[in-house]
Image: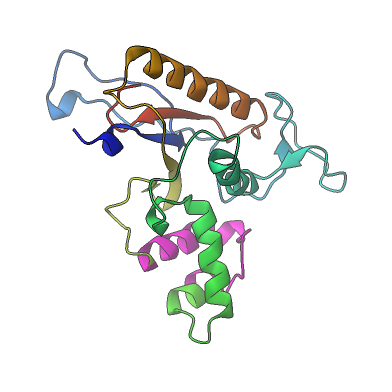
Amino acid sequence: MEKQDSSQFQIVFGLNPVDNGKFLDPSYEAQGTISFDESFDPASTQLVSRVGSAAAICDIERQCCSSSLYQYLLELCDRLFGKDGLGRKLSDDHRHACMMEQFDMWLQDQSTSETPSESFEGECLSSPSVPVPADIFDQCFFAFVNAAGRIGVDRRYLFHEGKLKVLAIHFSANATILSPSKDVSAEYARIADWSLNEMAQAPRPGASNFFVSSKVFW
């Protein structure tokens, strides 16, 4: 087992962390079903509270400690990989960056290009950056992942019935499955504490998340 592979993690948005399959039946039919978090809507530009778990809609003019979900997802990447963040990007390759951040960069690049793609002009209506109008967000994001060549092979997003339902951010932590148990315990505690603190300031509803290792070690 490669060391790098065993230390990869995901922060997952849009799913409920449930297992409703039959634990003692390994057949495909008994694997259970996906449980979507229906409050996760990255297309929404609605401002929601970022104070504790309150879900009250904020006064847009007052800008009262609030953000939209897309804004939160954009900012999360900097916090995750910053000085006080959890870990490292898996590589400098664009496929391992935060997808909302890459989506915004793609929009900006297309809007300043002398030869923008037909999908950008058609599906995104030439939107120069996020936020993209909610009524075209899903089709525009689909155009982005299609242009990036990631449809069907990327584990960082999931579309369902034409809507973006799941986003995941991948990162590499410090401990691996081969590390001493005390290092593994310390790393688990570090990730869990960071996640709890992050959840405390995340917008509600919509930004509930959980973390999991690539080997389902944690």
Is residue 86 or residue 115 the one in the foreground? 86
- Residue displayed at 42% across by 55% down: 92
Is 111 above or below relative to 194? below
Q: Quadrant of residue 27?
A: top left
- Residue displayed at 39% across by 60% down: 145
| Magenta span of residues | 123-147
Residue 120: % across, % down: 49, 73
Q: Quadrant of residue 118?
A: bottom left
- Left or right: residue 189 compared with residue 198: left
- Residue displayed at 51% across by 77% down: 121
Residue 73: % across, % down: 58, 45
Residue 159 appears in view: yes
Residue 3: % across, % down: 27, 34
| Magenta highlight on residue 77 | no
Seen from this angle, which residue lies furthest right?
62
- Left or right: residue 2 compared with residue 10: left
Quarter occupied by the C terminus? top left
Residue 14 appears in view: no
Quarter occupied by the N terminus? top left
Residue 153: % across, % down: 27, 53
